[in-house]
Image (cartoon, rainbow, N blue to C red):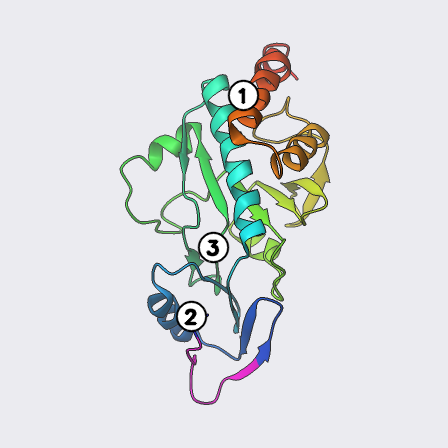
Amino acid sequence: MATASAGPRRRTTPAAAGIVFHDATWDDYESMLKLVGDRPIRVLYDRGEMEVYMPSYGHNHDAFLRGRMVDVLAEELRVSYRGGDTTTHKRADLDKGAEPDKCYWFGEKARQMSGKVRLDLPRDPPPDLVVEVDVTRTSLARLPIFAAMEVPEVWRSTGRSLQFLHLQEDGTYQARPFSRNFPALPVARVAQFLKEGRTADSTDWIPAFRAFVREKVVPGRRNGR
C-alpha cells in the first residue's frame, strides 16, 4: 500500500492492515485523502489519530453481500434509497472522518441526496444506515466516529458475527435483534444468509434472499412489526 508521510515529525505505529499516524492534523488528513485518491485504500481520522489501511478480499466480499441485501430490501419494500458505498464522511467541526464500507439514505433523506455528486457534512444529512465489515481489523474505533455524526444504525460484522447496532441518546450503540430501518428484518436470519453467501453462487443466493424478504419481511411490515 502507499507509504506516504503525513508530516516530517509524525509518530507512526504499524497496524494489522496498515499504519497509524499519531498527532496528525486535519490538514494531514485532508492531504492523505488527496494522496490516496481513488485507490482501494481507506483513511480514518479521529482527533489527531489517523489510520491508513487496505481492506482484504474477504472484507470487500462481505460488504458486497450486505449491499445486495439492502438493494433487495429497498426494492421489495418500495423504499426510496440512495447508496454512497465508501464515500468519505468528514466533519472538521467534530475533528473526525471515516469511509464506511457501504452507506445508505432512505425516504426523505434519499430525496435530499438526489443529484448530489459530493457529500458535504453537516449540510447534507448523515446516512440512515452504515455497513461496516471488520474482517480487516483497524486500530481506530469507527463506531464513535459514526455516533458523533449521528448515524442511527450500523450493521457491523467481524466475519464470525453480525450485529444490528442502534444509536442511543447517550451517543453509544446498542445491539438489537431487528433492524431500525427494516423493523421486520431479524439479525439472526441475516447472519445466516451472510454465512451462506460466502460460498454460494450469487445467482442462487440472491433469489433465495429475495424470496425470504417477500415471505417474511414484507408481510411483517404490513402487520406493524
Q: Nearer the viewer, residue 121 or 5?
A: 5
Look at discs 3 and 1 and give the one toward the viewer: 1
* Earlier-in-chain disc, 1 versus 2: 2
Q: Nearer the viewer, residue 1 or 36?
A: 1
Left or right relative to 176: residue 87 = left
The quadrant where residue 66 appears: top right
As drawn, the residue found furthest toward the bottom would be 9
Q: Name the side, left or right, on which 56 lies relative to 104.
A: right
Gap in angstroms between the C-alphas marked 1 and 2? 42 Å
**Residue 75, position as x, y percentages in the image:** 45, 21
Span colored in magenta: 3-12
Against 152, residue 47 (above or below) is below
Check whether the beta carbons of the residues at disc 3 and disc 1 lie within 8 A of each other: no
Query: Mark 1 belongs to which amino acid?
Result: Pro
Element assignment for label 3: loop
Lower sequence index among marks 3 and 1: 3
Residue depicted at x 39% and y 32%: 110
Task: Give above or below for 21 relative to 207.
Answer: below
Q: Is residue 99 magenta?
A: no
Crowd around label 2: few <14 · some 14–19 · many ≥20 (10 Å): many
Q: Amino acid at mark 2?
A: Tyr
- The CA distance from mark 3 to mark 1 is 30 Å
Quadrant containing the C terminus in the rendered view: top right
Residue at mark 2: 29
The numbered disc on residue 207 is 1
Mark 3 belongs to which amino acid?
Glu
Task: Give me the disc on residue 99.
Answer: 3
Q: Residue at x 57, y 48 (%)?
A: 132
Q: Main secondary structure of the magenta part?
A: loop
The secondary element bearing badge 1 is classed as: helix
Badge 2 marks a residue whose secondary structure is helix
